[in-house]
Structure formats: C-alpha cells, structure tokens
Amino acid sequence: MEYQMETLAIHADGTVCAEKTVAPAIHYSAVFKADDSAEFIEMSSVPQHPRNYTRYGNPVHERVKKLVADLEGTETALVTASGMGAIATTILALVKAGDHVIGQTRHYMSTAKMLDDMLQRFGVEVTLVDQTDAAAFERAIRPNTKLIVLETPVNPLLMLTDIEAVTRVARARGILTMADNTFASPINLRPHTLGVDIVVHSATKYLGGHHDMTGGVICCSKALAEDIWHTHITLGSVLSPMDAWLLLRGMRTLPMRIERINANALELAAFLEQQPQIERVYYPGLASHPQHALACRQMKGFGGVVAFGVKGGYAEAERLVSALKVPHNAGNLGGVDSLVIHTAAMWAGTMSAAQMAAADIPVNFIRYSVGIEHIDDLKADLLQALATL
C-alpha cells in the first residue's frame, strides 16, 4: 500500500526494528555485544550493521534512515552529526584530486567555503556558476567533471535552480548530482523525482523542527550509500542516538508543520509587500519573485523563509529587528518558532562593507524564518516594529 506523506511521517519506520513500543526506543550504547563468535563475525563484517558500534550504525539510526528515504523517494539514506557532515562526507566520498566539481555562486556559507577553498587545496578543480542560468551548468562541464552540487532555494535572495534542466544534462554525461534540500524540505520539493542522485539535509532545520538537535541526512541509492558510508565512518560524523530520537519525533509532525509554515510565510510575504517602509520582498511564492514560474513548476509549497530589505539602510534594519517581539533573533531556520536575523549585522564582524556588497548582502537585509505561530500575531508584531522606524 502506498501511503501519503502524512502517513509516511508516522509509520514509515515502524517495521525497521523489533521493539514492540509505540514510541521508538533510544539505544544509548556505543557498542553492542554478540551472543557467540558467529554473530560477532556477522556484526563486524556487515556494513552499516545497526548493532555493532554506533559509529557504524544504531537501531534508532535505522529508523531515521528509512523514514527520510521514504519521504525523499530514495532507496536508502545515511545519517550524520550535522548538515555539513552530510555535505562534506558526500563530496569527499565522490571526488579525488584531478576531478572537477560544478557548484553555484550561492550556497550555504560552509558549503561555499568547502567549494571555494578546501576542495581546491586537495587538488579538485571547482567551477561556480549562476544558478539562475541553467545553461551555465552545461557550459561549465569538462571531461573530468564528476559532480554537480545544487542548492535551492538559497540565501540570501531565495533564488532557485532549475533541477530538471541540470539533471537532464548531467545524466546524459554520466555526472552525479547532489542537491541540498534543507530550505524546501521533502514536503515542498523532492529533488530525486527530478533526477537528482543524492539529496542532503541539515536535519537541524525543518526535519527536526524544534531547534533542539543537530543532524544531517544523505538520501540516495543503496550502491551510492555503500560508497559514501566508507568515507562516513572514516570521518566520524556520528549522529548521537538522542539526536536521532529527537529527529524522529520532529519528523512525525513535518507535513502539518510545513503546511502551516508555508501558509504563514506566503501571507506574511504578501503583507510585507504592502508596507511603505519595506523596499523589496524576496519569496518564491510571490508573483514578484523573478523565478516565481519555476517555483510553481517544481515546488509544492514555497517554504518558510522570507527575505526583505528595509528602507533607510543598516540602522533602520537593526531597529526593526530589535523591535520585533515574537521571533527570536537567532541564526537558524526551520523550527516551530519564528527566527529573524539582520544579515549584515551577522556578518559585520567577519566581512567589510565592500565584501558584503560583493557577496550580494545588502546592509538593510533581513531574513525571517516563519514558524507556526498565529499569522495575525506575526503581522501585528511586524506592524508595531515597523511603526518604530
């Protein structure tokens, strides 16, 4: 029987482990014992055995892997201690010195650091292209291109990548593709159904959904998972059993949380567009977004991140953020409670004004990660904050 997302989120992992409990058990053991030598040999020789050593696998990891893989539509998954653990493990498993990787000019900042610096220090060539130009990916392909790294939507302006256009070219050339699906979640976008080979997540964000755990997930075929797993156990980015359990708990409500967050974010974005103190709003669900048509074509919902510029520059943006009462001023996204950051203030300690301008970080820019609070309260809070400008 083929279940809908809401049912999968509750029951997909129910047959993975033998426990009779309704709630999953937390297996907080670093190592598991064998009853005899034959069982020990089996435990030691089977990759990803869930009852050998927790760096290799754990029963609660198995449940997470099954659940996220089913939500993303892939054969299997691997779990890591963070989203960057998932991204770094995947890339390092698939490329070597002399290979070529294509990425985007805009990625999560640590992904960008890996592409701009780390890979090139290890002899891997990297080309970054404008993600809004699907043809640019094909133009960047070389004979030694092994991997294309995608992320959509992406900071700071929530620009999108035409996944089908890129994967069509990549598959014709035998090039693997990896997509970071953190911002969208599998409820809004399933990159694997559009041709992506490997889908990664920072599970810290929407999958966990409560700002109380860190984790990462790699969703792919069984063959790719086995290749990546050998690098994973070497790097040691291990998801703790408690964080795995918290992730399971969070994913039970993922479809209903995303439905509410999508609705709140779309209404809040439209509301912000009507405010005279706001310079511009960036949200894929708005007709004013330059890639709105693409968003409608490849996404089921538009996500919970709204970005906007405040008239008056840095000081007015800072004043608005300080006046807001509902969202927390914190650098994360994807939880039940709203979070807000003044992007330029976050980077002020590490980047000059010129560097921020080169990176398309306007000084008046605000990122609002919309939660599940009542939309009337979110709008009223914004109104009172805007009145202080």
Image (cartoon, grey):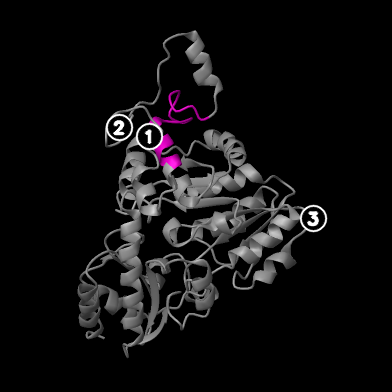
- Name the N-terminal-most of marks 2 and 3: 2
Query: Which x, y percent locates residue 361?
Result: 47, 74
Query: Which x, y percent locates residue 201?
Result: 47, 52
Asked if residue 67 can be seen in this view, the reply is yes
- Residue identifier under label 1: 60
Distance from the alpha carbon under mark 2 to that under mark 3: 49 Å
Distance from the alpha carbon under mark 1 to that under mark 3: 42 Å
- Residue identifier under label 3: 143
- Amino acid type, residue under disc 3 in the picture: Pro
Looking at the rendered structure, the secondary structure element under dot 3 is loop
**Residue located 22% across and 84% down the image:** 388
- Amino acid type, residue under disc 1 in the picture: Val
Question: What span is colored magenta in the figure?
Answer: 48-66
Residue 291 lies, with reference to residue 245, above or below; the image says below
Q: Are marks 2 and 3 in contact (CB under 8 Å)?
A: no
Location of the N terminus (image quadrant)? top left
Distance from the alpha carbon under mark 1 to that under mark 2: 7 Å
Residue 325 lies, with reference to residue 73, above or below; the image says below
Query: Which x, y percent locates residue 194?
Result: 58, 59
Location of the C terminus (image quadrant)? bottom left
Please state if 313 lies on the left or on the right of 164 as rendered.
left
Residue 18 lies, with reference to residue 165, above or below; the image says above
- Residue identifier under label 2: 25
Q: Are marks 1 and 2 in contact (CB under 8 Å)?
A: yes
Looking at the rendered structure, the secondary structure element under dot 1 is helix
**Residue located 57% across and 67% down the image:** 161
- Name the N-terminal-most of marks 1 and 3: 1
**Magenta stretch containing residue 129, yes or no?**
no
Please state if 123 lies on the left or on the right of 66 as rendered.
right
Q: Quadrant of residue 183?
A: bottom left
